[in-house]
Image (spheres, helix red, strand yellow):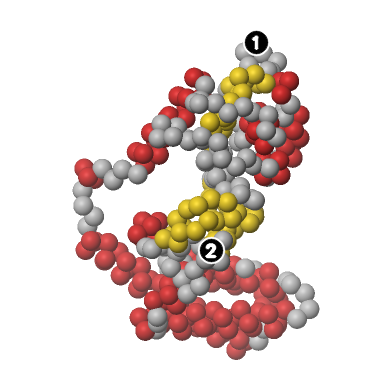
Amino acid sequence: MGERWSAEQVAALAPDASSAAAGRTLGSPSTWSGLGACTGTAEHPAAVWGLCRGSGKNPYQTVVDVSGPAYRCSCPSRKFPCKHALGLLLLWSAGSVPDADGPADFAAEWLRGRVERAAKAQEPVDRAAGPVDAEAAARRAERREDRVRGGLVELGRWLEDQVRGGLAGAERAGYAPFEQAAARLVDAQAPGLAAWVRALPGVVASGPGWPARLLEEYALMHLLVRAHENLDALPAPLAATVRRRVGYPVSRESVLAGPAVRDRWTVLGLRDDADDRLVSRRVWLRGSRTGQDALVLSFAGPGAVLDASLVPGTSVEADVHLYPDAAPLRA
């Protein structure tokens, strides 16, 4: 079956404190029947399952794909993982789930479906969509670069105006000048720089010594503008860093086409951040042999569930593809 997770690792999966507490309550063998766990095969992933007695006539059918992890439960909860999945995993972590040759019938169908869907996801894109128009793509990229170039020229002038007018003016002006400059950068398709400019009022409001910190931010932005002007002359890794800070998109396909770092990756920790429209998750990894650090970013819109496959404290042997950068980190 492989290495069991610790109770702390299971608790880290809980979507909130109330779910964690309810999961601990259900982590008792007396509420379960039909428990089992099996290793992964070509037909199904490694999994743990069980039937949890509830208030209704029929027990809840709970299955966890521990290689994902992914969860399925017949309960009506909209939380992932639900309290039943957490309780089941706590039983498994305590060694209270017996090993089995294969999954129970109620678990097998869902597990096989996951294998089939994963296989289909690896298939090439339907050729009926037609070949990519390389010339059209090149023209679009050229138009974007022209817009970005113009936006950065305008940003350079704006930075000069801010310094020439004196830093004290930033405190009096409030958010409006920064928001206007950021909006122009969005129009120029430079979202990375736009987000940076939008964060500058926070520097102004950061307390004593803010003028020096604001001047440092202006200097770094000016350096980025000048680096972009000489993008073609920069070493490829440094050019990739400049493009990333400006906000050029990098396709997942191009990253996966690059070399992979094979290692045993330990999940060091994770952090979730939320705004009105998006929830992001940052997961930090470290390779035990290479010492390489990696940051895995995932995003979810309203009502969607974040990827929970990387559990703090666990480790996995895997290939990691890093985004191009002078100091590669994002995976």
Q: Give the residue number, with chain letter if any, for mark 1.
A: 57
Image height of 300 relative to 167, above or below? above
Image height of 269 relative to 210, above or below? above
Of the residues under marks 1 and 2, which one precedes in the sequence? Answer: 1
Q: Where does residue 224 sit, x and y in percent of width and height?
A: 49, 79
Q: Between 191 and 88, which is closer to the camera in this rendering?
A: 88
Secondary structure state at the residue bearing disc 1: loop
**Mark 1 residue type:** Lys
Q: Between 222 and 89, which is closer to the camera in this rendering?
A: 89
> Which residue is depicted at the point 57% across and 44% down?
308
Q: Residue furthest right?
A: 208
> Which residue is depicted at the point 37% across and 63% down?
258
Give neighbour class at mark 2: few <14, some 14-19, many 20+ (Cα, 10 Å): few
Residue 297 in view of the camera: yes
Q: Give the residue number, with chain letter if any, for mark 2.
A: 289
Q: Where does residue 255 sit, x and y in percent of width and height?
A: 39, 60
**In the picture, which quadrant includes the N terminus?**
top right
Left or right: 277, with 318 as reference point: right
Image height of 176 relative to 274, above or below? below
| The label number, if any, that marks residue 128 in the structure image | none
Give neighbour class at mark 1: few <14, some 14-19, many 20+ (Cα, 10 Å): few
